[in-house]
Image (tube, rainbow, N blue to C red):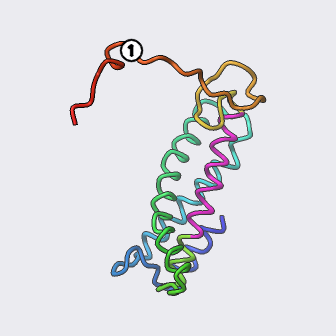
Amino acid sequence: MLYAAVQMVWAAAGTTVPWSPHVAYAPGVQLALAAGALLASGACLATPRPLARRGRVAVAAVLAVAVPVFAMGMASLPAYVVTLASLSGVESATGFAHVLLNTVGLGLLLVGVSHRRRLRGRCPRCGAGHTGDGSGPLVHPPACVASRRTRIQRCTC
């Protein structure tokens, strides 16, 4: 909800938020991002409640769209980390704030997705159904022997 509020304030004030070094977000895009963030926060709030089939489908659809949107919004985080680590400073404070808000938003959405999976009795990491109750430590599958064909294959380099 904080992300949506910040986007709406930036859109109303006409604040320049860079998408790339030479392209900025349009105010309409900022309002669309704010609307998407409000939908995502509503989906996360609805996750622990028992929902009908339509509600579950709606929550899943909103999360399936919101997670990639927030992930794309935080894609330039490594560039900001490098510029800060090299003491070069940031080119745009609003751009950096936007990337940080996307990063925090994505983290919270991923927590919501894993919580949703856990409530459905699925693995919170991968979403698949595993044997056991899932409360124990992670156990890697045993090593398997490669097929005979693979073992006799030789490198011709």
Say which of 85 and 15 sits in front: 85
Q: At label 1, which amino acid type do we have?
A: Ser
**Magenta segment boundaries in residue numbering:** 100-118
Residue at image location 51% in from the left, 18% down from the top: 144
Question: What secondary structure is found at the residue carrying circle 1?
Answer: loop
Answer with the quarter of the image where residue 133 lies: top right
Residue 103 lies in the magenta-colored region: yes
The outermost residue toward the right is: 135
x and y percent of residue 83 in the render? 50, 79
Residue shown at the point (58%, 54%) measured from the top left? 39
Q: Foreground: 20 or 39?
A: 20
Residue 15: x and y, percent? Answer: 49, 85
User: Is 119 covered by the magenta stretch?
Assistant: no
Residue 93 percent across, percent down from the top left: 54, 84
Nearest the camera: 104 or 131?
A: 131
Q: Quadrant of residue 137?
A: top right
Residue wearing tag 1: 147
